[in-house]
Structures are given as structure tokens and as C-alpha cells.
Amino acid sequence: MWRVFCVLLLVLTGAAGTSLPSVVAAESLEEAEFAYERGEYTQAARLFSPLAEQGVASAQFYLGLMHEKGRGVRQDYPTALTWFRKAAAQGYVGPQNNLGLMYERGRGVRKDLVRAFMWYDLAGAMLPGEEGKAAVMRRDQLRAHMTAAQIEQAQELVTRCRQSRFKQCD
């Protein structure tokens, strides 16, 4: 019976064009997300960590959130910033607003209104609905506290970030 199961599993994963590790990773990601949603943050962190290390952007984003808020791990803004940057470098839109906030408030990084503006601008263009509107509102609030030169610099960073497909944002 075990042999039949293994052969069937190989046929199914081969026919789907996926490998067994990617199927396992997908199940682990789903399990980690469910643990997070249930408030089982320590379990979620344990499940997200290997996926984040393997480069799964959504796992990196979740770990960033957990370090930012101290959920299941100790609160650590520099570590949150690292995970958010890794996810954002893959074009994952989730952490862009968080990065803007971290730069705006100087959490885990030197306060930098130019970079905060850049991340809010990117988030506003890519996030759907209320999240996108909130990012635009934050960007516009920052604009009132910035010089024309700072705004121009931020817009140049937005262009560079987009053109590099999020590889040259920081």
C-alpha cells in the first residue's frame, strides 16, 4: 500500500509540474498562516522561518510583522526591517506600507522621510482598496513636511525601484 501511495504521489506531482518540496512548502505556508490567524504566534514563527529562509516572500512578510509587533518572537525592529526588505525586493506588495512607516518613525532604521515617501508612494500605487488609500494619505502628509528637493529625490527613488523591479529600492 505504501509503495502504491508513493508512486501515485510521484505521478500526481510530476503531472502537475511541481516537485514534492514545493507541495510541502505550500502546505507548510498554509499551516503557518492558519497558526498566525489563530493567534498561535510561536508556532507560526516556527513554521514561517524555514520558508522565509528559502525566499518565500509571504513568509518573509509575516516574519517581519511578527518581529515588528513582538508576536511569537521578541520585538526587533531591525529584524522586521530585514524581512520586509527581502519580501519587497521580490515585488511582494505587503511590506511596502510597513517599510514606509518604519522609515517615517525611525523604527530599526534612521528616520528618513525620503524613503518613507518612496515606500508609501509604491504602496499607494500597488495596494488595493483602503490600504492603498491609506498609503497615499500618509505619503501626502509627509509631502507637507518635505522640501521640494526631498520630494524630487523620493520620486527618483520610486522610479529606480520600479525600473529595477524592486531590487534597488534602498
Image (cartoon, rainbow, N blue to C red):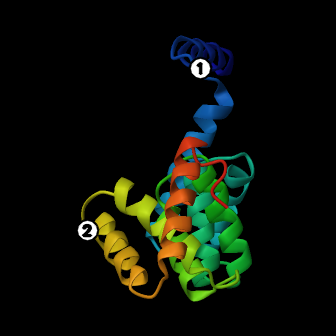
Residue drawn at x 54%, y 83% as measured from the top left: 104
Q: Which mark is residue 33?
A: none
Please rate how many residues cluster around mark 2, counting C-alpha atoms within 10 Å: few if below 14, some from 14 to 19, many from 20: few
Question: Which three-letter amino acid code belongs to the residue tagged 2?
Answer: Glu
| Mark 2 or 1: the one toward you | 2
Question: What is the count of numbered marks?
Answer: 2
Look at the numbered disc 2 and give the secondary structure of its residue: helix
Q: Would residue 51 appear left or right of 156 to someone viewing this image?
A: right
Image coordinates of residue 15 in percent, x first then y, are 53, 11
Q: Quadrant of residue 17?
A: top right
- What x and y, as percent, mark residue 11? 58, 11
From what the image shows, is residue 157 above or below residue 142?
above
Which one is nearer the viewer's eye here, 8 or 13?
Answer: 13
| Image position, residue 109 (x, y; %) | 70, 80
Q: Residue at x 49, y 61 (%)?
A: 155
Residue at 59% in and 13% down: 14
- Farthest front residue? 148
When the figure is inspected, residue 87 is found, relative to residue 20, above or below; the finding is below
* Numbered tag placed on residue 130 in the rendering: 2
According to the image, label 1 marks what residue? 9
Q: Amino acid at mark 1?
A: Leu
**How much space separates mark 2 and mark 1, taking CA atoms?**
42 Å
Few, some or many residues within 10 Å of mark 1 (<14, 14–19, 20+): few
